[in-house]
């Protein structure tokens, strides 16, 4: 680029020296040459700017991807390491299904991903070494790049207006108390895939699914993510609570928020067993046990639609 610039400027430099030496130079000719040189230089600079390639996505220093040896069993899933964990330089996944891996890479809940059914059953063991000082944002981009390179993942985004829930403070105030400071308990496991919640009974079938949790030092960000997966809908945080809390919650899935005439997830009225069960619905449990409330609204939700993904990863 520099050599080309010197060649283009050479005639102009000669004209300058000629003028300095008091050599007669035809002024119209000088103006014409200057215009040509200027237009050529700007064209070269513009072409150079247009041919600049975008910065490559962050990548792992080395990564190993292979099918899990568990035979498809969901037991023994391990997700460890990465930024924010006790081992930030090494990410390790054992027996993780590809569906969960994609949701983790893109920071979405399971209901926000549309893909082939086999992604829930095909499981892989993955280990990857991160460059020193990698951030969580860079880590997600590395996971996404790994999916593209090894599984040939291609997807697009869509936005849909759907029913959502907003988590707010209940009318009698929050019952949550901030967790005591405990450096050992504050250790983060790093990024984790969304929780998998047992399916509800089919519509018209009596029964309910019990939900019980006891999680120390939980932020509202993590809690609404947990609720989103349980309810299969987006839950947004409007509590204004910024601390970490020891959250204990038990109830059953089914029904709708108290005073909300909208239909439950399965459609129609909640099964009789869900109404007469001694355990409260998750909506009542959130209000009675935590002093919070789930309010039904409508909102735009990002949906990731998988256009192509391969079952067999490329060789290590």
Image (cartoon, rainbow, N blue to C red):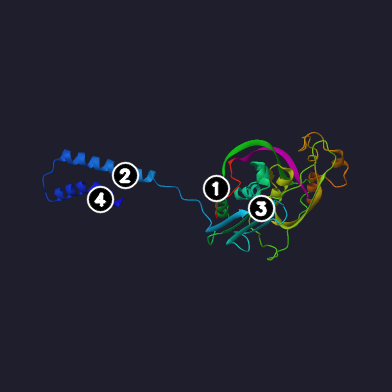
Is residue 48 at all visible to an observer of this figure? yes
How many angstroms separate mark 4 from mark 3 (CA)? 58 Å
> Under tag 4, what secondary structure?
helix
Quote the CA–CA distance across marks 2 and 1.
Answer: 35 Å
Place of residue 22 in the rendered image (x, y in percent of width and height, measured from the top left): 11, 49
The crowd level at tag 1 (other Cα within 10 Å; few <14, some 14-19, many 20+) is: some
Image point (35%, 46%), residue name: 48
Label 2 element class: helix
Q: Position of residue 222 (x, y in %)?
A: 69, 52
Q: Closer to the camera: disc 2 or disc 1? A: 1
The alpha-carbon separation of the residues under discs 2 and 4 comes to: 12 Å
Q: Is residue 205 left or right of residue 215?
A: right
Residue at screen point 27% across, 42% down: 40
In terms of sequence position, does the residue under pointer 1 or pointer 4 come before the other? 4
Q: Nearer the viewer, mark 3 or mark 2?
A: 3
Which label belongs to residue 96? 3
Disc 2 residue crowd, few under 14, some 14–19, many 20+, Cα 10 Å: some
Give the Cα separation between the discs numbered 3 and 2.
51 Å
Image check: 237 left or right of 173?
Answer: left
Tell me the chief SS of the magenta region: strand
Residue position for label 4: 6
Say whether disc 2 or disc 4 marks the residue closer to the N-terminus. Answer: 4
Specify the quadrant that holds the C terminus: bottom right
Asked whether residue 170 is drawn in magenta, I would say no
What's the magenta region? 291-306
Instruction: Work out whether residue 52 or residue 203 is closer to the camera in this orientation and state it.
Output: 203
Q: Secondary structure at mark 1?
A: helix
Mark 1 = which residue? 148
Q: Earlier in the sequence, mark 3 or mark 1?
A: 3
Residue 4 percent location from the top left of the image:
27, 48
Near mark 4 (Cα within 10 A), the count class, few <14, some 14-19 or many ≥20, is few
Mark 2 = which residue? 44
């Amino acid at each position: 680029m520099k050599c080309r610039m010197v060649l283009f400027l050479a005639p102009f430099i000669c004209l300058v020296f000629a003028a300095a030496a008091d050599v007669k130079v035809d002024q119209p000719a000088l103006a014409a040459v200057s215009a040509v040189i200027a237009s050529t230089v700007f064209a070269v600079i513009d072409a150079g700017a247009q041919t600049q390639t975008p910065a490559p996505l962050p990548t792992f220093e080395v990564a190993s991807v292979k099918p899990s040896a568990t035979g498809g069993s969901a037991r023994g899933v391990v997700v460890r390491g990465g930024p924010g964990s006790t081992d930030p330089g090494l990410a390790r996944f054992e027996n993780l299904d590809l569906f969960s891996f994609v949701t983790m890479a893109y920071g979405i809940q399971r209901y926000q991903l549309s893909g082939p059914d086999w992604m829930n059953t095909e499981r892989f063991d993955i280990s990857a070494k991160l460059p020193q000082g990698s951030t969580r944002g860079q880590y997600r981009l590395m996971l996404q790049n790994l999916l593209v390179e090894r599984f040939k993942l291609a997807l697009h985004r869509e936005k849909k207006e759907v029913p959502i829930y907003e988590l707010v403070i209940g009318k009698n105030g929050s019952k949550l108390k901030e967790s005591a400071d405990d450096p050992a308990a504050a250790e983060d496991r790093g990024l984790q895939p969304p929780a998998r919640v047992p399916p509800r009974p089919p519509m018209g079938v009596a029964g309910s699914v019990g939900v019980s949790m006891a999680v120390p030092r939980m932020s509202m960000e993590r809690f609404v993510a947990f609720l989103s997966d349980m309810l299969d809908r987006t839950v947004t945080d409007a509590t204004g609570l910024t601390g970490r809390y020891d959250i204990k919650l038990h109830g059953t899935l089914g029904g709708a928020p108290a005073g909300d005439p909208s239909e439950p997830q399965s459609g129609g009225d909640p099964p009789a067993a869900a109404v007469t069960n001694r355990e409260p619905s998750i909506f009542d449990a959130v209000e009675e046990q935590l002093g919070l409330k789930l309010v039904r609204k409508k909102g735009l939700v990002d949906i990731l639609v998988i256009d192509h993904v391969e079952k067999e990863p490329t060789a290590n």
